[in-house]
Image (tube, rainbow, N blue to C red):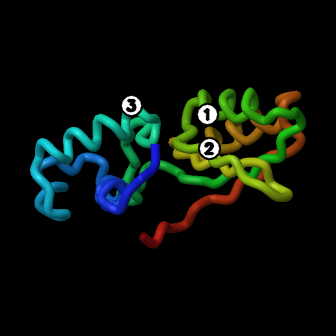
Amino acid sequence: MTLDQTDKRILAVLEGNARTSAAEIGRRIGLSRTAVQDRLSKLETSGIIGGYRVVISDAEGDLIRAALFVKIAVRPCEPALNWIASLNGVQEVVSLSGDIDALVRCAVPDVAALTALNDKIGQSELITSANSSVILRVIP
């Protein structure tokens, strides 16, 4: 599916807030609610929109957020990426080119849970190394 400017504008609104209603998207970009719903359906069916998810706000001070930088030992990387994505606490897995194969964003209840997650990933035979950095703040 080729995205036109209207599709890109819809996706931009959803990136800001995936819970934005079709009616509100329509008001913002000048389309009817029905037209937005039709486009959303096509974007979902084609796989452009792969799902909607909850992003935990930084205001949730009781969670520790971290970025894990992972080097994958196997090729293709897909099995390792999918395994990491299935682990508790993992919010997002981003496949990268370059020295680091994946950036893993996670949110865990405490330092012990972060250590356990980092160790679990790093000790897998699918993984060469995993290093974590605590996220201090996110600037939108």
Comparing labels 3 and 2, the label whose residue is closer to the camera: 3
Could you give the CA–CA distance between mark 3 and mark 2, rounded to whole angstroms? 22 Å
Circle 3 sits on which residue? Answer: 45
Q: Which residue is mark 1?
A: 85
Q: Position of residue 23 (x, y in %)?
A: 11, 50
For marks 1 and 3 on the same chain, the one whose residue lies earlier in the sequence: 3
Whether residues under marks 3 and 2 lie with C-beta atoms below 8 angstroms apart, the answer is no
- Distance from disc 1 to disc 2, alpha carbons, whole Å, reads 6 Å
Q: Residues within 10 Å of mark 2 (few under 14, many from 20)?
A: some
Residue 2: x and y in percent read 45, 49
Residues under numbered marks 1 and 2 in contact, where contact means CB atoms less than 8 Å apart:
yes
Q: Is residue 84 left or right of residue 50?
A: right
Label 3 SS: helix
Please state, as top left, top right, bottom left or bottom right, where the C terminus lies in the image.
bottom left
Q: Earlier in the sequence, mark 1 or mark 2?
A: 1
Q: Residue at x 64, y 41 (%)?
A: 112
Q: Tag 2: residue type?
A: Val
Question: Closest to the observer: 32 or 138?
Answer: 32
Asked whether the beta carbons under mark 1 and mark 3 sit within 8 Å of each other, the answer is no
Image quarter of residue 124: top right
- Residue drawn at (54%, 53%) of the image: 65
Q: Element under label 2?
A: strand
Residue position marked by numbered label 2 in the rendering? 93
